[in-house]
Amino acid sequence: MLVTNLTILVLAGFVGFAVISKVPNTLHTPLMSGTNAIHGIVLLGGLLVLGTVDGLGTLDKLLLVIAIAFGTINIVGGFLVTDRMLEMFKGRKAEQVEAAAEEDESK
Amino acid sequence: MTTLAASFIHDADFIEVLYIIAFALFIYGLMGLTGPRTAVRGNRIAAVGMAVAVVATLLVEGMDNWALIVVGIAIGTAIGIPAARNVKMTAMPQMVALFNGVGGGAVALIAWVEFRTSGGFSEDALYVAIFSLFAAVIGSISFWGSNIAFGKLQGILPGRPIQLPGQQFINGALLLVCVASAIIIAAGTTSQALFVLGILVAAALLGNFVVLPIGGADMPVVISLLNAFTGLSAAATGVALNNPALIVAGMIVGASGSILTNLMAEAMNRSIPSIVAGGFGGTAIAAGAGADMGDRTVRSTSPADAAIQLSYARQVVVVPGYGMAVAQAQHAVRELATELEKRGVEVKYAIHPVAGRMPGHMNVLLAEADVPYDQLKEMDDINPEFPRTDVSLVIGANDVTNPDANDNPGSPIYGMPILQVDQSKSVIVLKRSMNPGFAGIDNPLYYEEKTQMLFGDAKASVQEVVSEVQEL
């Protein structure tokens, strides 16, 4: 189990490097915000522990409800904020940005 | 039939498949985020992936405590949606810091509950204990560090560096306490107090102390670093809970955050360790206040004079900074550029990689104001153009134009690449007052003979200049 998980861990790290290293400067802020939303996935941890672990005390439950609320804020807020930022690049502007990005690459 | 369907959707393999779909969507979505045309869709695809991952988790066999789960998600949604909807574009950086912080907080809380319910990890394998402890330490650092970053950017805490005597020593000692406590707990100690004090509280203090001394242009680097930290801690939680979706998503964030942090640090010619060690701007206050403040004067100008100078220039370079963001001046700036272009003036924008509070901050704001993308020039492209620029219009930018970075080895920003504004024929600086910038570093550019200051709110000043230009 541990070895499988470590394999996944290492490979995911390389995928992260490979996917991200090509982002143009303009999109760094939305990218930071978008990846920020994705680590809200810790919500799953909260759900799993609260939903499947036996013998939780009142304090445990309280902590987990807070953790779930935190995770949800991270996810919902993160994706919404990123969406608002990216809306500005939509439509006519997107083509200009694209053209300029291509120009950058050809340099 | 229904029982067959019910047992199928709760099947562990089916849930694993959903997780695989979820993280495929994350990766595909992030690939979309790398291009402007596909970015909006990419973000939404990643959000769909998240929804799949959450639903898959809720299908896990034997899920219980539904009421509490609903309460937690409801509270989070009720806080998250309005916060994200109503935040102003200029307050984006602190919002990202805050969302990042709560993620770290969730990681630390989950690790704490795991410790409590497993008899201090005594029922778990050693690796589970190690990864949980790592998650607890990093999550707690990220939570408190992000909150401090939020407080500083929001103006609740002073933006200047706050430093204790012997800061490095204290930070080192706190880190040592965390590591030592983690080793003792992993070795089999089950003391509650040790976990709370040695892990959570020590890491919380460390998070506070690491971010408090950081000011100026270092802030975005730190937020990015904390973002990467939260990702890594989420991945560690994933290993401890044996959940592949958490591992993949957390690790991708950890990797991307590290790259972004590195890019930003490189743009400033600073290493990440020296940023984390802190004190950027701390020595600057002493250096700035010390020497020859007395005999230097600044020339102020009026909107009418500025309008004339700009209208009769051949090339004007606009240098935007955080001040433009705060004053929401981007639309007025765009209007001014349009007026000038009507008169045959060539207008360009010089974007420093760390202008504002996050990389790309200026691009986002100017894109909002419909500034054509091809007029936005990056530092290396625009710097050779300054000697043939008639007027550089600096709007609320400070440290990124500071010539001390080139020629004053005593300055804390010495060696940072800057926009060579001081090489242009004349400079007009829009600024609220003579107060030094966010980093508290004095800028000799303001005292140069060719520099004129236009004091006041950036938006109001630009609007006045626009109406003066229109009357010419």
Image: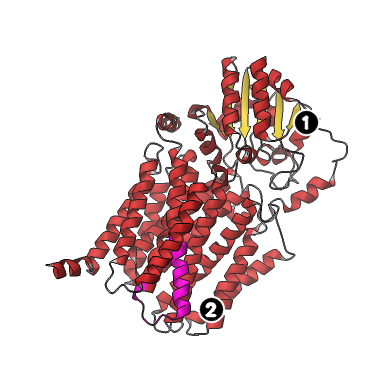
**Nearer the observer, B178 or A82:** A82
User: What kind of secondary structure does the magenta stretch mostly adopt?
Assistant: helix
Query: Is residue A60 covered in magenta?
Result: yes
Q: Which residue is mark 2?
A: B195
- For residue B169, what is the image quadrant? bottom right
The residue located at (45%, 62%) in the rendering is B75
Q: Which residue is mark 1?
A: B448
- Residue B179: image x %, image y %? 55, 74
- Residue B317: image x %, image y %? 62, 26
Say few, some or many: other residues with alpha carbon within 10 Å of mark 2 (under 14 / 14 to 19 / 20 or more).
many
Question: Could you tell which of marks 2 and 1 lies nearer the N-terminus?
Answer: 2
Q: Chain of mark 1?
A: B
Q: Chain of mark 2?
A: B
Q: What residue range appears in magenta?
A: A51-72
Circle 2 — which element?
helix
The residue located at (50%, 45%) in the rendering is A29
Query: Is residue B75 covered in magenta?
Result: no
Q: Nearer the viewer, mark 2 or mark 1?
A: 2
